[in-house]
């Protein structure tokens, strides 16, 4: 298996998403919304609010390698089967070729808002594989929004098939 093949497989799994950034792509790009930050002064218990304009950049979301391994073609399944200990679920951490995994992760991170300096949030797309291990469980739900600004925890807002909303805190 090589990086080119993995990326070709990933192209069949891309999802649309919108990245909300603080930088417009052109001088006349309309504002898509605002982000508010509350700043507290040491002597002031009320603080003040800073409003930051957000601009939408619509693109596609490359899936995490876990998704390629889980939903890839029969060729991917045949290649990865020997590495799957329980013959049920395989993740990128189970793959012995670390250089291939690292190469895919480099491409994945280059297009992901989490690794983009001016990204505030994303709407839709694939969800990240966080250390808490709930990635597979969340496949049955739809990611609405994920925040990236400031610091942890990052927030993901999900909707399930019954139209119930759920907020998940994510830590790296």
Image: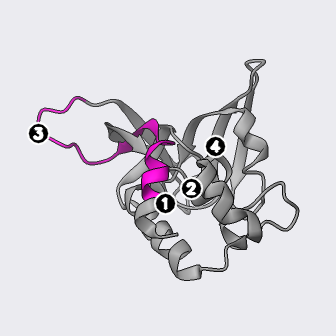
Label disc, if present, on residue 6 of the rendered structure: 1
* Residue beneath the point at 52% across and 69% down: 1
Query: Residue at (43%, 40%) from the top-left corner?
Result: 35
* Picture quadrant of residue 116: bottom left
Q: Residues within 10 Å of mark 3 (few under 14, many from 20)?
A: few
Which numbered circle lies on residue 64? 2
Q: Secondary structure at mark 1?
A: helix
Find the distance from the CA under tag 1 to the CA under tag 4: 27 Å
Is there CB contact under 8 Å for labels 1 and 2? no
Mark 4 or mark 2, which is nearer the start of the sequence? 2
Nearest-to-viewer mark from 1 and 2: 1
The one nearer the camera, 66 or 151, is 66
Mark 1–mark 3 Cα distance, whole angstroms, equals 37 Å
Q: Is residue 25 magenta?
A: yes
Among numbered discs 1 and 3, the one appearing first in the sequence: 1
Q: CA distance from mark 3 to mark 4?
A: 30 Å
Residue 24 image offset from top left, x and y in percent: 22, 43
Q: CA distance from mark 3 to mark 2?
A: 33 Å
Q: How many marks?
A: 4
Q: Quadrant of residue 32?
A: top left
Local secondary structure at mark 4: strand
Residue 27's disc number: 3
Q: Position of residue 129 (x, y in %)?
A: 65, 57
| Depth order, front residue of 64/5 | 5
**Magenta run includes residue 63:** no
The reply to whether residue 17 is visible in this rendering is yes
The numbered mark, 3 or 4, whose residue comes first in the sequence reads 3
| Span of residues in magenta | 6-30
Picture residue at 54% right of the left edge, 47% below the top: 147
Name the residue beneath numbered marker 4: 156
The nearer-to-camera label among 1 and 3 is 1
């Amino acid at each position: 298996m090589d990086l080119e093949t993995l990326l070709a497989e990933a192209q069949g799994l891309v999802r649309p998403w919108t990245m909300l950034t603080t930088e417009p792509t052109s001088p006349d790009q309309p504002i898509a919304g605002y982000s508010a930050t509350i700043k507290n002064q040491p002597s002031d218990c009320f603080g003040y609010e800073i409003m930051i304009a957000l601009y939408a950049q619509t693109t596609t979301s490359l899936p995490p390698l876990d998704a390629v391994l889980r939903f890839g073609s029969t060729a991917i399944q045949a290649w990865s089967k020997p590495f799957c200990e329980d013959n049920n679920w395989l993740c990128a951490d189970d793959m012995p070729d670390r250089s291939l995994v690292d190469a895919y992760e480099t491409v994945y991170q280059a297009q992901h808002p989490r690794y983009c300096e001016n990204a505030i949030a994303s709407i839709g797309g694939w969800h990240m594989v966080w250390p808490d291990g709930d990635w597979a469980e969340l496949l049955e739900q739809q990611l609405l929004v994920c925040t990236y600004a400031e610091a942890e925890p990052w927030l993901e807002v999900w909707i399930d098939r019954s139209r119930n909303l759920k907020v998940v805190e994510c830590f790296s």
